[in-house]
Image (spheres, rainbow, N blue to C red):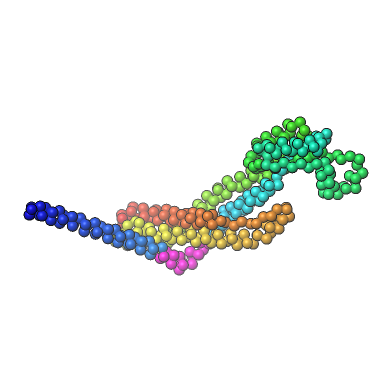
Amino acid sequence: MHGAQRRKSGRTRGRQPLGVAERFNSANLLARLDSYAFQHAHNLIASLGRLYRSPASLMTIGVIAIVLSFPLSFSLVLKNAQQAIGGLEATSRMSVFLKPDISNENGQKLTGKLAQMPQILEARLITREAGLLEFEHYSGLGEALKSLDFNPLPVVITIQPRDALSSRAEVQKLIAELSALPEVDFVQADMEWLLKLQTLLGIMQRTLITLGVLLSLSVLFVVGNTVRLELHHRDHEILVTKLMGASNAFVRRPFLYTGLWFGLLGGLTALVLVGILAVIIQVPVHQLATLFGHELTLEFVSFSEAMLLLSLSALIGILGAWIVVESHLRRLRALGTS
């Protein structure tokens, strides 16, 4: 019995050091996390303070903002152009002119058949009489038309295709099918110019991507050059820090936050500049759209697009700073300081 108690007591004593070690490791891990978070928060705020105290930083942020404003403005124009085309798409129709001997009744029957076709969203009949009244109203030749003994206009069916701007091949295929009908004289498509405009917008989208990449590289160079100058001014401080045993991550961290602030503040300033531009041109754009008989409300950058811009600009700033600092640290390693 005493042996069993000793064994039990021994197991109990054997477990106690393990529990103490676990608590020590847990406390040590929490302390490291707190220290890590404090260092990052300190560098984040300190780097912003250095930017605030440096007049040259405002110039750098302004340059970044102007550079980012170009692709952002181009994207805004493209976005509103696509919106305008979306509104014009509803007015893009085909006019199917029937042969002169086709009566209104036969035209009505053909209209019903066309409305059942899967490629057609809507089909509407314009009778001879309705067509003549419309022609008199818009042509100003009412007196001359009244002298005619007969109505020279044919029956017309106006068609609204489905997905009118999907592709040129689909539009041409539908025109060929309608032209092959025995009652049809010819088909006039009003959407060809919209297809050409859509192709132009596709070219503009690719141009926007290319412009964005090139200007992003420009921002990268601007941030890198600014961080390089700061590295030059703090070269002795960095050298002493490295001689005291500081890690590369410790040296690199404040400069990465500097790049972060450059990119983030530059992106915010670019959003403000483009917003001011949108307000300035809002009224002229609305007047121009009204002249073309189309209502257009100028759209600004959405919240998700703004967050994407800020994320990319901050990432570019961090990348530019990292490239320059890493090059500087490699130079220090080559000199044998680390």
- Of all residues, the one furthest to the bottom in this rendering is 53
Q: Residue furthest front?
A: 1
Q: How many marks?
A: 0
Residue drawn at x 45%, y 68% as measured from the top left: 53
Q: Is residue 165 above or below residue 72?
A: above
Q: Position of residue 69 (x, y in %)?
A: 56, 57
> What secondary structure is the magenta-colored segment mainly?
helix
Tell me: 315 left or right of 203: left
Q: Is residue 141 left or right of residue 63?
A: right
Q: Residue furthest toward the left?
A: 2
Quadrant housing residue 237: bottom left
Residue 286 in the image, given as x and y percentages of width and height: 68, 58
Tell which of 100 and 58 is nearer to you.
100
The picture quadrant where one finds residue 251 is bottom left
Residue 169 higher or lower than 250, as above or below:
above
Let me know if residue 52 is in the magenta part. Answer: yes
Query: Residue at the location (73% across, 31% down)?
Result: 180
Q: Give the range drawn in magenta.
A: 45-62
Picture coordinates of residue 104 (x, y %)?
81, 38
Residue at 27% x, 58% y is: 26
Query: 6 or 252, which is in the foreground?
Result: 6
- Which of the 4 image quarters holds residue 38? bottom left
Res 25 seen here? yes
**Is 305 left or right of 111, judged from the image as shown?**
left
Q: Where is residue 54 in the image (x, y as percent from the top left)?
A: 46, 67
Residue at the image position 35 percent from the left and 56 percent from the top: 249
Question: Which of the two residues, 172 or 221, is positioned nearer the viewer here?
Answer: 172
**Residue 239 visible somewhere in the drawing:** no
The C terminus appears in which quarter of the rendering? bottom left
Please say whether residue 177 is one of the residues in the magenta stretch.
Answer: no
